[in-house]
Image: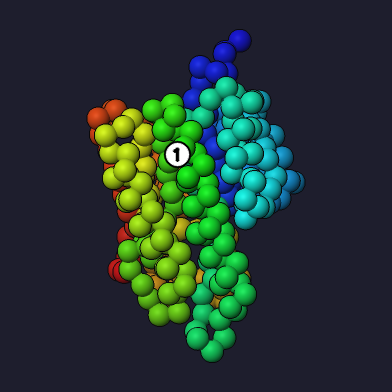
Amino acid sequence: MTDSTSTKTAVITGATGGIGAAVARALSQAGWNLVLTARSAEKLQALASELGSRVAVVPADLTDPAVPAALLSAALTNFGRCDLCFNNAGFLETGPIESIDIERVCAMVRINVEAAFRVAYTFLRHFVRENAGHLINTSSILGTKVRPTAGAYAGTKYAIEALSEALRMELAKTDVQVSSIQPGLVMTGLHDHWQVHPSELMGIAEPLQPADIARMVLFLLDQPPHVRIPKLMILPKGHEI
């Protein structure tokens, strides 16, 4: 039997969404132990059943300040180590000034910024103690640009970009890595409530698929120790902004 403590372990937030689930599948296929978290216990159990035995699930609301430490504890208790935090939970709220739902915007800030910051610092403190580990933050192309009606969402991702770069600089001489991925349009549930899908609005015939992002996460993890990739932008053909 394989010793689970000798196998790398990843914690994935937003694990039942398109990108989170795709990364979980890719890492599972690569032999990693996984700690998965999302709000839906039912969806987490379904994903865990699909992936097999080296999976622990923590159903939770990530805006609870106690959850990041509980996730780290789950990794250490179940698998004896933590090597990667894929800081991925988030959602999208957009709209014009006259009609945007401000309460939804504030909820978005709590998950996309406050919760993501708590996760980042919790796991990096552990990685610094171990002088090993990789934090990968899910940002967006809109962490580098803005467009009308999406300023609030872009602001949350600009915050992730600023934090990621500052943390990278702080840890540049250590063996702890910080990266952000900046996807363009990906076919996930983020746009399920839109009347017209942005692929139609933007004229993109083939949006990215979650598996494309998972492949890029594996690419980040497959670099030799002296190579750092702080930012990785992934765009589909036809994505102009």
Quadrant containing the C terminus in the rendered view: bottom left
Is 97 or 213 nearer to us in this picture? 97
- Taking the spot 53% from the left edge, 65% from the top edge, the residue there is 109
Is 123 or 24 nearer to us in this picture? 123
Asked if 228 appears above or below 119 in the picture, the reply is above
Asked whether residue 26 is in view, the answer is no
Quadrant containing the N terminus in the rendered view: top right
Asked if 56 appears above or below 40 in the picture, the reply is above
- Characterize the local packing of mark 1: few (<14), some (14-19) or many (20 or more) Cα atoms within 10 angstroms: many
What amino acid is found at the position of numbered circle 1 in the picture? Leu
Asked if 133 appears above or below 196 in the picture, the reply is above
- The residue under label 1 is 124
Query: Residue 30 at x, y = what percent?
Result: 48, 28
Asked whether residue 41 is in view, the answer is yes
Query: Residue 67 at x, y = what percent?
Result: 63, 45
- Taking the spot 71% from the left edge, 40% from the top edge, the residue there is 45
Q: How is the image coloured?
A: rainbow
- Taking the spot 57% from the left edge, 13% from the top edge, the residue there is 2
Query: Residue 142 at x, y = what percent?
Result: 38, 65
Asked if 77 appears above or below 227 in the picture, the reply is above
Is 79 or 49 nearer to us in this picture? 79
